[in-house]
Image (spheres, helix red, strand yellow):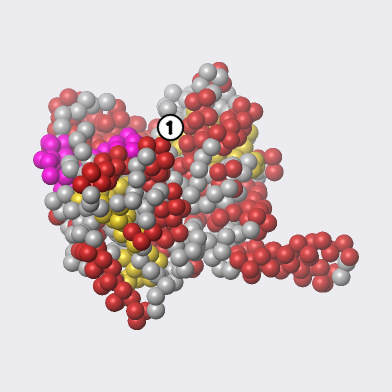
Amino acid sequence: MSSIIESAGKRLTQEERFEKARTLIFPTPAEASARLAAEVADLIRARQAEGRTAVLGLATGSTPVPFYRELVRLHKEEGLSFRNVISFNLDEYCGLERDHRESYFSFMQDQLFAHVDMPPENVHVPDGTLPVDEVYDYCREYERKIEEAGGIDLQILGIGRTGHIGFNEPGSTRDSQTRMITLDRVTRQDAAADFLGEANVPRFAITMGVGTILAARSLVLMAWGENKAEIVHSAVEGTVTDQVSASFLQEHPNATFLVDTAAASQLTRSCRPWLVRSVTWDEELEKRSVVWLATTLDKPVLKLVDEEYNENGVGELLTEQGPSYDINIRVFNQLQHTITGWPGGKKGSDDTNRPERAQPYPKRVVIFSPEPQDAVTSMGGTIHRLVDQGHQVTIVYQTSGSLRVSDVAARKFSSVILEMGEVLGDEGWKSQTSYAASIIAQLDEKGEFGIDPENVRRLKGLILRGEARDASKVFGAGDSTNLFVDMPFYEKGRYRRFHLTDDDVAIVKKVLERIEPHQIFATGSAADPSSVQALCFTALRSSLEQLKEQSWLGNCFVWLYRGRDKRVDSHEIDMAVPMSPDQLALKMDAVRKFQSIGREELSTADQNREIAKNYDSLGMAEYEAIEAFQRWRP
């Protein structure tokens, strides 16, 4: 593969013809980050040899973390010096002191600056503590410093769900420069977990402007995971618009999108390859193309005709597998056979066309929930069916979820204990009231954004544990259904700073060895690679790899569900579990048990209804809602 930094000027291939900016696809974020870091090292060393500085524009967030870790490795293991590097960061929240745990200055210290030999005077991160009346002059000075350094040689970027680069929210113009900006609500929602609730996320930030960013000699935008796929598609293949500031990279002569396979999944060459090359038509690709055609034309599958195949780029399928009537019937049957009210298989039935086997019955079922709310919010209706149909269900809560629990919940719990002690006036309550008072004191001492002391974090985890138990009881599940394992990577870390270890993998492996399940439900395969969900899935994948010689694993189906990440498209669904209005209401009753975390985390009913609506539009039976799963075949 050619150089990442120098690839942008090269002519696009036939497969890339829908793309308006050079896009390089790597199998994993680690491989992409290693390649980019190696090229940055070459740039730094070349400038060192010339006695010149290398000027880098740097980004924050979870996306560049593997890139920064590779730079640190190159410094520590291969002697890469940063003494001739000058850096300018894209942005910073307003109102946060530099030592605040969520400030971008603190983030950059944790991820890069504290681990390399870059002189402190060469580091530039916007100052978010300035009075408002000083911000304009400060931003002009930030621009002057970039110019004084000779301009930015290479600007590293991420991309937000709104398509922003830096904090250039929708409406940011192409010539905008460094300034204060009001953050979009979607951006604040995405940061809610870091700040223990959306209400705590700063409303303003200082950011380099689009024009400032585009002035860099080279740009590399990184994106990982399927949850970034749709916005990457918009930025790369859509029109240039100030509603998606990343789309302005299409106009830069040396801009490259660096993505992993998952983030590239909505690009035409990935999701509709028949439009850019000749393909081998297998069952999966036939289903994908027909569902796409029906959705594009807003027609049920069985009503598609030959002319519509030919006129919309699917004529090759018609030639090889047609006529359209036969293709329509095959795909319709595939879709119909995914629908089942028996997610654990129906005992004594013909399972030829069912997604799950009738035997064995009952099945031992393990449901992995990375954070306690994940399983209930994403597949609560399916949990209810599995329990109600007599299967041996174990919900494995992989982490405590304490980082999502608000201070208000911990304070409320402690205040109730204090009041009980006062009302009862019983000496037996002395230790409890002392504990409650200490919790409140620690909450007061750390403040709104301080790091939770160990006792506070443990209490928050226990609060969420109780809510998880209450939620499972809505489905008729007893306490034996719930297994809390508190994986160490979470308990010892925090968002964007997690490190998975062998101890985490060992915990998941031990659970599987003890239960030897016939079914596994898991999530995180499509999530941001640094997220709790993705790390928990990595631990599961590693455990299954270590257990691959076990005989029971050959009789185990693994089903993937989705949470807040990208929803499952209709053609991707291998098992669709329908819900009636009453069943959806029951699920939402269970979801509401999670009172200690933000409401924005728990909005799933609309997603379930949307899946059902999409199935209905393809000609399937009409349901109130559907929970969807993919069969994972590693």
Instruction: Please provide percent x and percent y for residue 175.
Output: 18, 67
The answer to which image quadrant residue 389 occupies is: top right
Which of these two is toward me, 104 or 411? 104
* Residue at the right extreme of this rendering: 427
- Image point (41%, 63%), residue name: 188
Whether 118 is drawn above or below 503: the answer is below
Instruction: Please provide percent x and percent y for residue 77.
Output: 41, 37
Which of these two is toward me, 364 or 547? 547
Which of these two is toward me, 26 or 213? 213
602 with respect to 112 (left or right): right
How dense is the environment of label 1, judged by Cα within 10 Å: few (below 14), some, or many (20 and up)? some
Is residue 2 located in the magenta-colored stretch of the structure?
A: no
Instruction: Please provide percent x and percent y for residue 229.
Output: 31, 46
Which of these two is toward me, 43 or 130? 43
Instruction: Find disc 1 in the rendering and name its residue.
Output: 631
619 with respect to 565 (left or right): left
Instruction: Please provide percent x and percent y for residue 566.
Output: 38, 47
Give the SS element for disc 1. strand
The residue stretch that appears in magenta: 8-35
The answer to which image quadrant residue 353 occupies is: top left
